[in-house]
Image (cartoon, helix red, strand yellow):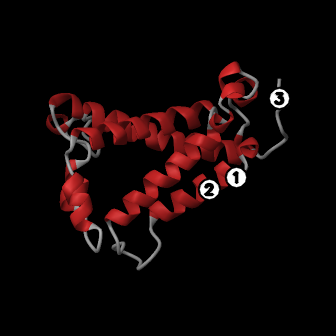
Amino acid sequence: MIPQPKTPLSASLLRIAMGWLFLWAFIDKLWGLGYATAAAKSWINGGSPTYGFLKMGAKGVFAPLFQALAGKAIIDWLFMLALLGIGVALLLGVAIRFASICGVVLVVMMWMVVLPPANNPIIDDHIIYALVFLLMAYQPLFFSRLSFYSQWLPSRFVQRMPWMK
């Protein structure tokens, strides 16, 4: 069993908040709870979780690429699995490094969709999220308080696949 480090509670609260942010996005897009996604446009009602953002939100040099991906079933599945996986992993505090690296990839791609950002020529919330994810990927133990990390690390699964730390 890995000993729990004496780390600030705020670090783990940040991990939990990031996890909830991504899990909530998954839940809202799946069921259309009326926050960012209307029920009629939910994934279970036949809507695409990527279509609106990629088709209408894409601008700049990468717009043609992202607009071509909008609404494709494989892109919808990959996006939703990423939201779910990142959210659950961070909430539980397992696979923190792997989930954080996936998070960096996801939010940087989302940042590329809106280049240049509306309110700042370079930095927007996606870059802030990417920096938080990089910090979590670099020091997962620092964010492991209030988690199952100490039970996760010695598991056979992680021993066979150490990249899942």
Camera-nearest residue between 41 and 141: 141
> Which structural element holds mark 3?
loop
Q: Earlier in the sequence, mark 1 or mark 3?
A: 3
Residue at 44% x, 68% y is: 124
Spatial distance from mark 2 to mark 1, Cα to Cα? Answer: 6 Å
User: Which residue is at 44% across, 51% downward?
Assistant: 106
Left or right placement of residue 16 versus residue 143 in this view: left
The amino acid at mark 2 is Leu
| Looking at the image, residue 111 lies above or below residue 26 | below
Element under disc 1 = helix
Q: Seen from this angle, which residue lies furthest front?
A: 160
Q: Quadrant of the C terminus?
A: top right
Q: Which residue is mark 2?
A: 134
Query: Where in the figure is residue 142, as x and y percent of width and height?
Result: 75, 45
Query: Mark 1 to mark 3: distance in Å?
Result: 18 Å
Q: Which mark is residue 138?
A: 1
- In the rendered structure, are the residues bearing label 2 and label 1 in contact, judged by CB atoms less than 8 Å apart? yes
| Residue that protrudes farthest toward the top in the picture | 156
Kindly report the distance in space between the C-alpha atoms of the residues bearing marks 3 and 2. 22 Å
Tell me which amino acid carries mark 1: Tyr
How many residues crowd mark 3 within 10 Å: few (<14), some (14–19), many (20+)? few
Q: Nearer the viewer, residue 158 or 115?
A: 158
Assess disc 2: are there few (<14), some (14-19) or many (≥20) residues with their C-alpha within 10 Å of its C-alpha. some
Kindly identify which residue carries mark 3. 2
- Going by the image, does 40 lie left or right of 113? left
Tell me which amino acid carries mark 3: Ile
Q: Residue at x 24, y 39 (%)?
A: 34
